[in-house]
Image: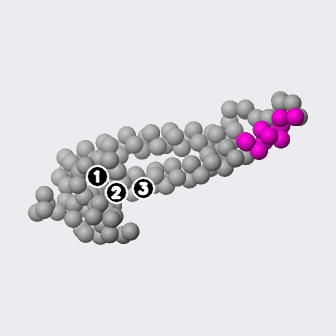
Amino acid sequence: MSDKTRYSDAELEEFRAIIMEKLDAAKRDYELLKETIMNVDGNDVTDTSPTFKVLEEGAATLSKEEAGRMAQRQMKFIQNLQAALIRIENKTYGICRETEKLIPKERLRAVPHATLSIEAKKSQK
């Protein structure tokens, strides 16, 4: 693998399929989080007794804040996957941006949006 400078078109297609699958799942998860934040299901505290209303409103606010943070992380993940698709189109996918060597397939299968090899990642710490 040391003399290889990029992945073949067939290998890139394999990675594209992995990324598309993860991207579809990530988009579905993001939509669910958005619905949670926007309270689309109508499950709010308007029909509860006043005694529990304050506690439930506090819990709902915390829940929405956490959902907001999760939605932000999910959107970043989606953007990283989309960037990986662009690298596939440019045929630069799987090349470490630090060492300029190929990132092992095993790493890309586990983290398809990776731009650093394990060695480069470790040297950053």
Q: Which mark is residue 114?
A: 2
- Counting residues from the start of the chain, the first of labels 1 and 2 encountered is 1
Tag 1: amino acid: Arg
Do the CB atoms of the residues marked 1 and 2 lie less than 8 Å apart? Answer: yes
Q: Nearer the viewer, residue 100 or 51?
A: 51
- Residue 35 in picture, x, y percent from top left: 63, 39
Within 10 Å of disc 1 (Cα), the crowding (few <14, some 14-19, many 20+) is some
Tag 3: amino acid: Asn
Can residue 78 be seen here? yes
Q: Which residues are magenta?
A: 51-60
Is 42 situated left or right of 20 in this image? right
Within 10 Å of disc 2 (Cα), the crowding (few <14, some 14-19, many 20+) is many
Specify the farthest residue to the right: 50
Tag 2: amino acid: Ala
The kind of secondary structure the magenta stretch mainly shows is helix
Residue beneath label 3, please?
Answer: 80
The secondary element bearing badge 2 is classed as: loop
**Residue found at x 23% / y 55%:** 104
- Residue 106 in picture, x, y percent from top left: 25, 49
**Residue found at x 77% / y 44%:** 58
Between the C-alphas of marks 3 and 2, the distance is 9 Å
Residue beneath label 1, please?
Answer: 107
